[in-house]
Image (tube, grey):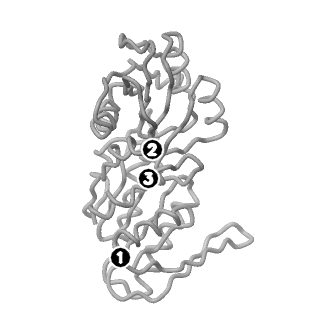
Amino acid sequence: MILSGSASQALAAALAVELDCDLGVVDYETFPDGERMVEVPSIDGRAVVVCSTPTSDAHVELLLLQDAAREAGADEVVTVLPYMGYARQDRAFSAGQPISARAVARAISAGADRVLTVNPHEDAVCEFFTVPAEPVDAAGLLADPLPDLVDPVFLSPDSGAIDLAESARDAHGTGEVDYFEKQRDYETGAVAITPSEVSVAGRDVVVTDDIIATGATMSEAIAILGERDPRRVFVACVHPLLAANARLKLANAGVEAVYGTDTIERAVSEVSVAPVVADAL
């Protein structure tokens, strides 16, 4: 049976179709003091808990779902993290700080037999779990919603995300791949971007990344790109967090359209990761 967190209902429904299995109706409640509660139906066999955790409340909801699944009779709990919050905090940046990704991974492990997470910021975060955990790659899906492209260039905002650009290009079938040089000062949070040497004049450009959070760094990169006269600029990401006014920043930078998956369910979620998650299950 598939059990869904409140932020992952569309994906859970799509996954139930892919797996041809039951989709449990989960009741969610928030008490007046802010505490969360969930209720799940009776379960016979395996429970697959699908729960993105873009907020701290969502993390608590996931822990409750896992525990509820056990109480409802599940003999195995597989947790699917379409988007794993805190995954980017995979190191202590100064003395006295936690390794937040490790802390939440250990908490999730206490209620799961196995964990899948879609395109974590670094695959190495899977090592923080104390149960078997593996990443699921949805980058190839980013090509699906793209319109017809003219002599495309697939760009990543930094070298660390070049695999995403390559996967999207390969799925599209043609195009050049390159990236921006990006250096972050962890003391101040400032990011310096060095323009790539790739020629984009008259060409369609697709900027890919695993996650768009505030959109600040990506919009800065795209603004630099705009000085080179691209034909059109699109953005494709796995996790469209799009916090605050991120979508406006991208539009002002010259982005024609933003495409994301349903790991975080937003208006730009044009493609579902259900098929690749189903394959991993």
Is 68 or 11 nearer to us in this picture? Answer: 11
Residue flagged by tag 2: what amino acid is it? Pro
- Which of the labelled discs sits on residue 28, or is there none? none
Q: Tell me which corner region of the image, top left, top right, bottom left or bottom right, holds residue 109.
A: bottom left
- Which of the labelled discs sits on residue 20, or is there none? 1
Residue drawn at point x = 31 percent, y = 49 percent: 137
Q: Distance between the residues labelled 2 and 1?
A: 25 Å
Quadrant of the frame with the N terminus: bottom left
Residue drawn at point x = 62 percent, y = 36 percent: 247
Residue 86 on image: x %, y %: 46, 48
Q: In this view, does 110 lie above or below 222?
A: below
Q: How far apart are marks 1 and 3 (CA)?
A: 25 Å
Lateral position of residue 197 relative to residue 131, left or right:
right
Residue drawn at point x = 66 percent, y = 32 percent: 248
Between discs 2 and 1, the one toward the N terminus: 1
Q: Tell me which corner region of the image, top left, top right, bottom left or bottom right, holds residue 244.
A: top right
Q: How far apart are marks 3 and 2 (CA)?
A: 23 Å
- Which of the labelled discs sits on residue 84, or is there none? 3
Quadrant of the frame with the C terminus: bottom left
Q: In this view, does 210 lie above or below 192?
A: below
Residue drawn at point x = 44 percent, y = 85 percent: 71
Residue 134 on image: x %, y %: 27, 55
Q: Residues within 10 Å of mark 2 (few under 14, many from 20)?
A: some
**Which residue is under mark 2?**
145
Disc 3 is placed on an element classified as loop
Disc 2 is placed on an element classified as loop
Q: How crowded is mark 3: few (under 14 residues within 10 Å), some or many (20 or more)?
A: many
Q: How crowded is mark 1: few (under 14 residues within 10 Å), some or many (20 or more)?
A: few
Between discs 3 and 2, the one toward the N terminus: 3
- 1 or 3: mark nearer the eye: 1
Residue flagged by tag 3: what amino acid is it? Met
Residue flagged by tag 1: what amino acid is it? Asp
